[in-house]
Image (tube, helix red, strand yellow):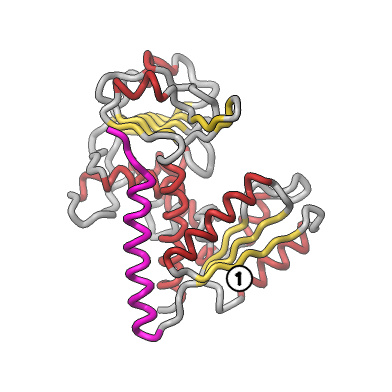
Amino acid sequence: MILNGKEIAAEIRAEIREQIDALKAQGARVPKLAIVLVGNNPASETYVNNKLKACAEVGIEALKLAYPTEITEQTLLTEIHRLNSDETIDGFIVQLPLPDHISETTVMRAIDYRKDVDGLTPENVGRTVQGLPSIVSATPKGIRELLARYQIRTEGKHVVVIGRSNIVGKPIAMLLMQRPYLSVPSMSAASLGDATVTICHSKTRDLKSICLTADIIIVAAGCPNLLTADMVKDGATIIDVGINRVDGKLVGDVDFEHVAPKAAYITPVPGGVGPMTIVSLLQNTLQAYHEHTR
């Protein structure tokens, strides 16, 4: 079965829209998101425009703040501090990657974790690891929500995560091994946590043997067609986070054509995890808004 992230994201956007319409009916202001874009990276421009479009669809007020590539790190940090203190802004993101002369780590550390709707600050990552209330990184949150909406249980399952990035690999491993987070009321609490997780990466030996023991494989390695059919047992669930351009075509980290017949569930590229990442950003913005307006 195809895990259709595009359809699930549309369902969630409709739910968010209802909540924001209810705020308007009560005379309350709507959530406001700022998106900081540095430079003119075409891929970043596309991602930002998609986020702005998604915000407009659900009724979130969105502000794009574009800065030239040559902006200094200190000037950017000054802008971040201004956003931190702006009471009209509920949340903001700094679109990555940043130019080489600006430290992403320094920038992430400067963001107020309460407004960090990307869930990438050390505070939010640390709170996520400890199982404390946090704003969860958008892509891992989207993956978890996709599993939940398709009623795919993780309790007692062996999950193999290929990739150890701070944005996807590490946080999704933490989320799925922890005690359950109940995202969808109709599901039992046991459905969304308590997995046994193995993290693999470029130095892992005998990746194939490890993958063949997995009930769920999440691939976020940035390597086209890394996961092949001979690495997957029948009936496994496959989550492909990769977005690669090969010969002008978008492909994932999974050899979809040959793996799909063996999988019980699999995400396509595009149309799988990508839409769930953007809708998770909207959910995070709404979460930050409610915390901000308490």
Is 63 colored magenta in this rendering? Answer: no
Q: Judge left or right: residue 80 versus residue 152.
A: right
**Which residue is located at x 47 percent, y 59 percent?**
54
Q: Quadrant of residue 146?
A: top left
Q: Give the range drawn in magenta.
A: 1-27
Q: Quadrant of residue 48?
A: bottom right
Q: Is residue 245 visible?
A: yes
**Which residue is located at x 40 percent, y 72 percent?**
290
Q: Judge left or right: residue 99 versus residue 36.
A: right
The x and y percentages for residue 80 are 66, 65
Which image quarter holds the N terminus? top left
Most foreground residue, 45 or 129: 45
Which image quarter holds the C terminus? bottom left
Q: How crowded is mark 1: few (under 14 residues within 10 Å), some or many (20 or more)?
A: many
Q: Can residue 210 be seen in this view?
A: no
The x and y percentages for residue 92 are 56, 64
**Which residue is located at x 37 percent, y 59 percent?**
13
Q: Judge left or right: residue 244 versus residue 169.
A: right
**Which residue is located at x 58 percent, y 66 percent?**
34
Is 10 colored magenta in this rendering? Answer: yes
Most foreground residue, 160 or 194: 160
The x and y percentages for residue 163 are 49, 32
The x and y percentages for residue 253 are 48, 28
Q: Which residue does the numbered mark 1 point to in the structure image?
A: 84
Q: Which amino acid does label 1 sit on?
A: Asn
Q: Judge left or right: residue 41 versus residue 266.
A: right
Q: Main secondary structure of the magenta part?
A: helix
Secondary structure under badge 1?
helix
